[in-house]
Amino acid sequence: MRLLILVSILLISGLCAYAQARQTHPEPASAKTSSVTASKKPVLRSPLETKLSGVCGQWAEYWRQKKLDAVVALYAPEAVFLTGTGDRFSGREAIRAIFKTAMEGHTSELTPRSLVTEVSGNLAYDSGDYLETMTPASGVAKTELKGNYVIVFKRQGNGKWLIIEHVWTDKPAQ
């Protein structure tokens, strides 16, 4: 129960921080930006926060290369993946199955941008936005999407940080 409360607090604080970041840093994910906000204050991250904020980029690279095993290895055995359509996939095998279907049906060019990363004890989260160009395996019309993500990490007994909750939303890019 304490874990659920802590995860809820982390998600809420992340969403609040994300909203603040969007107000001061409103350019789209496609814009080339440095790690400074509109007020030119550098975003300072600890080495661990920097490492965790890079996981989404690593995930995107594996996704582009269709390295299913590498993508799935980023998740804890009990992980949950939530889609923008309201679907919930629990456990590595369910996540593997949905990702396999997606990889077989599409090629993706995904560009994520981490906006907020925070660590509290054995839990952490990364929140950001992304642009994606999806091309169906048939090669017909590409789809341009944009969206947001939140990834919640948990430090495992061996010290490794793995994804335990991953929320991904998207809509057509405008």
Image (cartoon, rainbow, N blue to C red):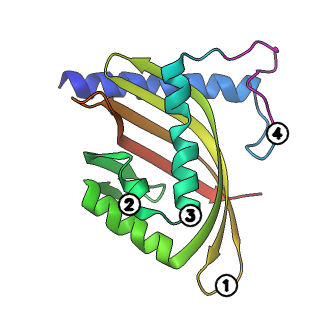
- Mark 1 or mark 4, earlier in chain: 4
Q: Is the residue under label 4 in contact with that under label 2 (CB below 8 Å)? A: no
Gap between marks 2 and 1, in whole Å? 25 Å
**Residue 70, percent across and down?**
42, 55
| Helix, strand or loop status at disc 2 | helix
Residue 142 in view here: yes
Q: Nearer the viewer, residue 25 or 94?
A: 94
Write down the residue under mark 4.
32
Q: Residues within 10 Å of mark 1 (few under 14, many from 20)?
A: few
- Mark 3 or mark 1, earlier in chain: 3
Looking at the picture, which amino acid does disc 2 mark?
A: Asp
Gap between marks 2 and 4, in whole Å? 30 Å
Q: Main secondary structure of the magenta part?
A: loop
| Helix, strand or loop status at disc 4 | loop
**Residue stretch rendered in magenta on the structure:** 33-43
Gap between marks 3 and 4, in whole Å? 23 Å
Looking at the picture, which amino acid does disc 1 mark?
A: Gly
Relative to residue 97, is residue 80 depicted above or below?
Answer: above
Q: Nearer the viewer, mark 2 or mark 1?
A: 2
Q: Nearer the viewer, mark 3 or mark 1?
A: 3
Relative to residue 144, is residue 158 depicted above or below?
Answer: above
Residue at the spot 33% in from the left edge and 27% down from the top edge: 7
Write down the residue under mark 1.
139
Q: Nearer the viewer, mark 3 or mark 4?
A: 3
The numbered dot on residue 65 is 3
| Quarter of the figure with residue 3 | top left
